[in-house]
Image (cartoon, helix red, strand yellow):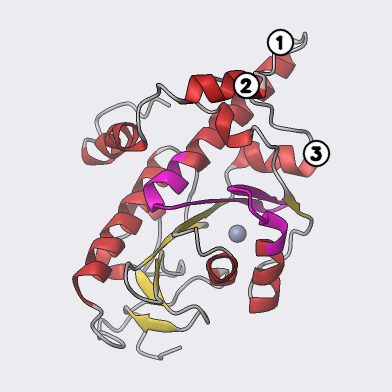
């Protein structure tokens, strides 16, 4: 890792417009996650830089890199699949191996979000299933959620590969006693998955408080519900509006 981190000097090759656009999208995902209270200064979204072997990822928190809500695109780190910094002036997060491990194992995945969002994480801690009980969010958990059964930091390639193995072909995973991971083709979809997961965890929690037996939406109904719903870009326009106009209430 270059010792130029935080000096303002550019490190590594210029990987062009694709990198700039991807860094902007990762910075926006950081801002959305923060605005909704799913992150503070920990956690990190990432996305593959199209046409390259590189990944744009939120930089490691430091005295310079603080709240997730104020990450600028040019502060976003670009790393290779070994986790080495190839562009940017700030260190990548120690847990970048969550991301590189998944990208190595899942060619179909182009974005990864890791958070410590509280309710979904606690469901993983108590090993209680987050049931598909809300129509918009149900598809996300229709197959259940796999668990990586350790609270240890994922700070090397071996643990990153173990997280990817726990994830398998699912689109989300508990990191038990730690947080969650969501994956998708875009950083916007992976971020929305984290939001939907927390909404579902909240609904499951509230249903348990009220008592009674929640109606779990059956798989065939989930498939029928999913078809006519709006695409992720419509939902993302709402979430980015909360970042663009901070006077709006962050309803979700
Ligand atoms: Zn973490």
Q: Which element type, helix, strand or loop, lies under badge 2?
A: helix
Quadrant holding ligand 1? bottom right
**Mark 3 or mark 2: whose residue is earlier in sequence:** 3
CB atoms at circles 3 and 1 under 8 Å apart? no
Magenta-span inclusion, residue 71:
no
Residue wearing tag 3? 126
Residue lying at 51% horizontally and 33% vertically, measured from the top left: 196
Above or below residue 200? Residue 62 is below
Tag 1 or tag 3, which sits nearer the N-term?
3
Dot 2, how many residues are within 10 Å of its Cα: few (below 14), some (14-19), or many (20+)? Answer: few
Closer to viewer: mark 2 or mark 1: 2
Mark 3–mark 2 CB contact (< 8 Å) = no
Asked whether residue 133 is in view, the answer is: no
Q: Nearer the viewer, residue 168 or 16?
A: 168
Can residue 63 be seen by looking at this rendering? Answer: yes
The number of numbered discs placed on residues in the rendered structure image is 3
Q: Residues within 10 Å of mark 1 (few under 14, many from 20)?
A: few
- Disc 1 CB within 8 Å of nearest ligand 1 atom: no
> Which residue carries the number 1 mark?
210
Q: Which stretch is magenta?
A: 165-192
Q: Which residue is mark 2?
A: 220
In 3D space, how far apart are the residues under numbered discs 3 and 1 (Cα atoms)? 19 Å
Quick one: which residue is furthest to the left in this view? 17
């Amino acid at each position: 890792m270059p010792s130029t981190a935080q000096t303002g000097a550019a490190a590594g090759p210029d990987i062009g417009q694709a990198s700039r656009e991807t860094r902007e999208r990762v910075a926006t995902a950081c801002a959305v996650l923060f605005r909704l209270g799913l992150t503070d200064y920990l956690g990190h979204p990432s996305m593959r830089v199209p046409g390259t072997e590189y990944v744009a990822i939120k930089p490691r928190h430091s005295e310079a890199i603080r709240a997730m809500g104020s990450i600028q695109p040019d502060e976003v780190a670009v790393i290779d699949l070994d986790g080495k910094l190839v562009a940017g002036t700030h260190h990548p997060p120690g847990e970048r191996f969550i991301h590189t491990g998944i990208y190595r194992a899942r060619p179909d995945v182009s974005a990864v979000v890791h958070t410590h969002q509280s309710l979904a994480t606690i469901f993983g801690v108590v090993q209680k299933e987050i049931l598909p009980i809300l129509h918009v969010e149900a598809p996300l958990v229709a197959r259940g959620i796999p668990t990586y059964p350790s609270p240890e930091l994922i700070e090397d390639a071996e643990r990153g590969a173990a997280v990817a193995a726990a994830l398998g072909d699912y689109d989300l995973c508990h990191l038990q006693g730690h947080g969650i991971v969501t994956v998708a083709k875009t950083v916007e979809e992976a971020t929305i998955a984290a939001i939907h997961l927390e909404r579902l965890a909240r609904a499951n929690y509230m249903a348990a408080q009220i008592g009674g037996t929640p109606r779990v939406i059956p798989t065939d109904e989930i498939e029928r519900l999913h078809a006519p719903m709006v695409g992720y870009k419509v939902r993302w326009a709402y979430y980015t509006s909360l970042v663009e106009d901070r006077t709006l209430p962050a309803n979700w």
